[in-house]
Amino acid sequence: MTIDTAPVIRIVDYGQGNLGSIRNMLSRIGARSEVSSDPDEIGRATHLILPGVGAFDRGMKAIADRGLREVLDQQALEVRIPVLGICLGAQLMTRGSEEGDLPGLGWFPAETKRFVFEPPLPKLPTPNIGWRDVRAAKPNTLVSGLEDECRFYFVHSYFMVSDDAASVALQSDYGYEFTAGLQRDNLFSAQFHPEKSHRFGMQFFRNFLNA
C-alpha cells in the first residue's frame, strides 16, 4: 500500500503522547491522518500509530478506561493492519515493564527494562536524551533509504528486551547496545521519536505507510 491509495491512518489518543507532532510530520510527507479515541474509527483504520509519553501503568490504564483494548487487539492480531508503537507506545506492546505492575498488550514476546549501568560501565544519566545512531539488526523496511545515515531522537529510561532475536529490527547504543525497535509481521515499534527526527523521521514514516 502506498500513500497515493489514501490509507486511513489513525493516531490512537489515549491521553499520552505527542499527537499533534506526529500528525504534523505525517502531513509533511503528504499523508492525511486523524487523532481518535473512538473504537469504531480505530476499527476502520488501515494503519494505526500508538504514541506515548509517560508511565507504563498509566498508559495501560488509560487504554482500558477508554475501552480501546479490544479494538487494538483486533486490529493488530486479527485484521493485522500495520501498527506502529512509538516510545511508550512501543513499550506497551511488550508483556510488561519494570516501571509498573500492569501487564502490557503482549504483542511482542518482550519485556521493558530500565537502563542499569554496572561497573565497569560508565554511569550515564537517565533518561537517555538526544540524537543517536540507529542501525538495522536485520533487513527491514523501516529504515529503507537511510542506510548511509540513520539518526533519531531519543528520550527514554526504559527499553525493550525481546525473547525472540528475530523480532529485533533496530539497535542503538547508550552505554551498551539496546533494542531501538521491534518488528514482527504487521507490528512495528520504535523506542525513538520519529516525529522529532526531521528528515530521518519523515523517511521512517514513509516506510511505515508503505509496509
Image (spheres, helix red, strand yellow):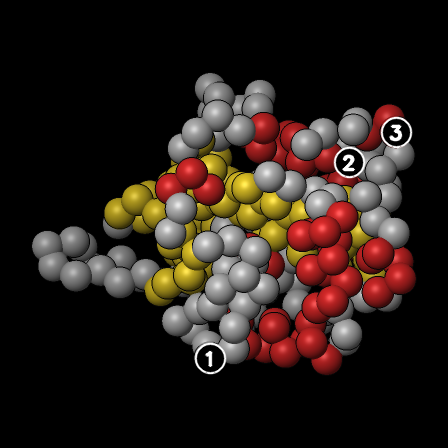
Residue ID at (58%, 28%): 141
* Spot occupied by residue 60 in the image (x, y as percentages of width and height): 61, 73
Check disc 2 and give the amino acid type. Answer: Arg
Q: Which mark is residue 59?
A: none
Q: Nearer the viewer, mark 2 or mark 3?
A: 3
Answer with left or right where residue 6 lies relative to residue 86.
Answer: right
Q: Residue furthest front?
A: 78
Q: Residue under circle 3?
A: 5
Q: Which residue is mark 2?
A: 28
Viewer-nearest of discs 1 and 2 = 1
- Residue located at (54% from left, 68% from top): 104
**What whole-number distance in Å separates the C-alpha atoms at marks 1 and 3?**
41 Å
Amino acid on which the number 3 mark rests in the picture: Thr
Q: Is residue 118 visible?
A: yes
- Return the x and y of residue 7 as percentages of the image width and height: 85, 38
Number of numbered discs present?
3
Q: Residues within 10 Å of mark 1 (few under 14, many from 20)?
A: few
* Residue 94, image x, y percentages: 50, 60
Quadrant of residue 61 in the image? Answer: bottom right
Check disc 2 and report its element: helix, strand or loop.
helix
Other-residue count near label 2 (Cα within 10 Å), few / some / many at <14 / 14–19 / ≥20:
few
What amino acid is at disc 1?
A: Asp
Q: Earlier in the sequence, mark 1 or mark 3?
A: 3
Label 3 residue SS: helix
Looking at the rendered structure, which numbered label has been put on residue 101? Answer: 1
Vertical placement of residue 37 versus 9, above or below: below
Whether tag 1 and tag 3 are in contact, CB under 8 A, the answer is no
